[in-house]
Image (spheres, helix red, strand yellow):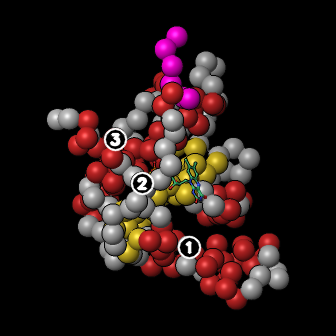
Amino acid sequence: MGASDNFYLNRRSVLAKKMKNHPIKDEHIDLIVKAGIRVPDHGALNPWKIKIIKGEKLKITDEEVILSEFKKINPQASDDMLEIESKRLQRASVVLAVLSTPVDHPKISKWEMALSSGAVCMNLLSCAQSLGYAAQWLTEWYSYNNKMLEYLGGRLDKDQISGFIYIGHKAEEPTERRRPDPQKVISYL
Ligand SMILES: Cc1cc2nc3c(=O)[nH]c(=O)nc-3n(C[C@H](O)[C@H](O)[C@H](O)COP(=O)(O)O)c2cc1C
């Protein structure tokens, strides 16, 4: 296999707003989450959780959490803005919310636990993309909202939302985005 057909050298995200949101096979969701939790995890502490949001739960979460919190924070919001917030998760077929849930440990730092949670996000994203799905890792404002954190089962002041992995279907192949200049970020010691 040459570099040109290497999955990791070609993998790209598809914007959530460009996805098609018809359902995804449950067996693929199972596969993606199983792959997602196969990550480096110092001490095997499993300091993360995945909440699968699909079907009617997408609409319910959009309306009862995202839109309702947005209205509270932005009482002057225009109808156009409310329309966007009312359908955030429904852009996707399934959304995987990843929580960083650190534990107290005498030797392993919370930083390492947070890194492991990021690895879960990246694994979920890559696995979905390897199956040919459109996928994107987003935080947006509601990753930093306490009502959302509690709704997903997180503990206030302890856990954090690492991101929402949006997964849907591709309407078209994405165009390449600006990539880092290897010479600026990679060097030999
Ligand atoms: C933690 C994290 C949060 C992100 N949140 C957002 C976001 O809220 N809005 C956005 O437009 N892009 C966000 N992005 C960037 C998107 O994931 C973007 O699609 C990505 O940079 C594309 O990378 P890729 O094509 O290499 O997969 C975020 C990325 C990360 C790692």
Horizontal side of 24 relative to 97 (left or right) equals: left
Q: Kindly indicate the quadrant of the structure image that contains residue 128.
A: bottom left
Residue at 64% from the left image edge and 72% from the top image edge: 66
Give the percent coordinates (x, y) of residue 62.
Answer: 57, 76
* Disc 2 + disc 1, Cβ < 8 Å: no
- Binning the other alpha carbons within 10 Å of mark 2 as few (below 14), some (14 to 19) or many (20 upward) gives few
- Residue type for callout 3: Leu
Q: In the rendered image, which quarter is residue 88 located in?
A: bottom right
CA–CA distance between discs 2 and 3?
A: 11 Å
- The kind of residue on which mark 1 rests is Arg
Q: Nearer the viewer, residue 180 or 123?
A: 180
Residue 186 among those drawn in magenta: yes
Tell me what residue is drawn at x 51 percent, y 19 percent: 187
Residues at circles 1 and 3 in contact by the CB criterion of under 8 Å: no
**Vertical placement of residue 159 versus 133, above or below:** above
Say what secondary structure mark 1 lies in. loop
Find disc 1 in the rendering and name its residue.
Answer: 88
Q: Are marks 2 and 3 in contact (CB under 8 Å)?
A: no
Residue under label 3, please give it: 9
Disc 3 secondary structure class? helix
What range of the chain is rendered magenta? 184-189
Q: Is 126 colored magenta in this rendering?
A: no
Which residue does the numbered mark 2 point to in the structure image? 176
The answer to which of marks 2 and 3 sits earlier in the sequence is: 3
Real-space Cα distance between discs 1 and 3? 29 Å
